[in-house]
Amino acid sequence: HNSKSPKKLPRVLWNILANEDEAVSWTPSGEAFVIKNDNQFFDEIFPRYFGNIKNKRSHFYRSLSRYGFDRVDDEQIKFSHTLFRRDGF
């Protein structure tokens, strides 16, 4: 079992958002994050933080759901959680 997966998802996601602003970033309000380039996110960034996991997209989306994140936009890959904010969680 990969030690970086899902039990540490919020902390790892926080680190990704702090360091990888080209493909994924906070929304201007800081109340959600958006994956701006999903190919770059899943092909380059995801493996650096979560290791080599098969079915990366479905794994990531299931993990977000397990943690209570909601997809908040049908046109963008945007997720929010009431306790996960840019100003602290």
Image (cartoon, rainbow, N blue to C red):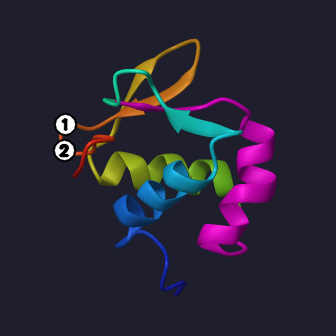
For residue 19, what is the image quadrant? Answer: bottom right
Q: Secondary structure at mark 2?
A: loop
Q: Residue at x 48, y 73 (%)?
A: 5
**14 to the left or right of 31:** right
- Please name the residue shown 46% across and 65% down the image: 12
Q: Position of residue 27 (x, y in %)?
A: 45, 25
Q: Residues within 10 Å of mark 1 (few under 14, many from 20)?
A: few
Tell me the amino acid under the disc marked 2.
Leu
Start-end of magenta stretch = 32-54
Q: Relative to the observer, which residue lies in front, 19 or 56?
A: 19
Q: Is residue 66 above or below residue 81?
A: below
Q: Can you give x and y, in whole percent of width and height, for residue 87 in the image? A: 26, 42
Displayed quadrant of residue 55: bottom right
Viewed as shown, does residue 84 lie left or right of 46?
A: left
The vertical placement of 33 against 9, above or below, is: above
How many other residues sit within 10 Å of disc 2, few (<14), some (14-19) or many (≥20)?
few
Q: Tell me residue 20's x, y (percent).
A: 64, 50
**At label 1, which amino acid type do we have?**
Thr
Q: How many marks?
A: 2
Q: Residue at x 74, y 33 (%)?
A: 37
Give the answer, above or below, for where 1 lies relative to 8. below
Identify the residue position indicated by label 1 in the image: 82
What is the spatial separation of the Cα atoms under label 2 and label 1, in whole angstroms?
A: 4 Å
Q: Name the residue tied to disc 2.
A: 83
Please check the rendered image and state whether residue 37 is part of the magenta-colored stretch, yes or no: yes
Above or below for 76 versus 86: above
The residue under the point 67% across, 59% down is 46
Look at the numbered discs 2 and 1 and tell me whether their residues touch, using CB distance below 8 Å: yes
Judged left or right of residue 30, residue 82 is: left
As helix, strand or loop, the secondary structure at mark 1 comes to: loop
Q: Nearer the viewer, residue 86 or 1?
A: 86
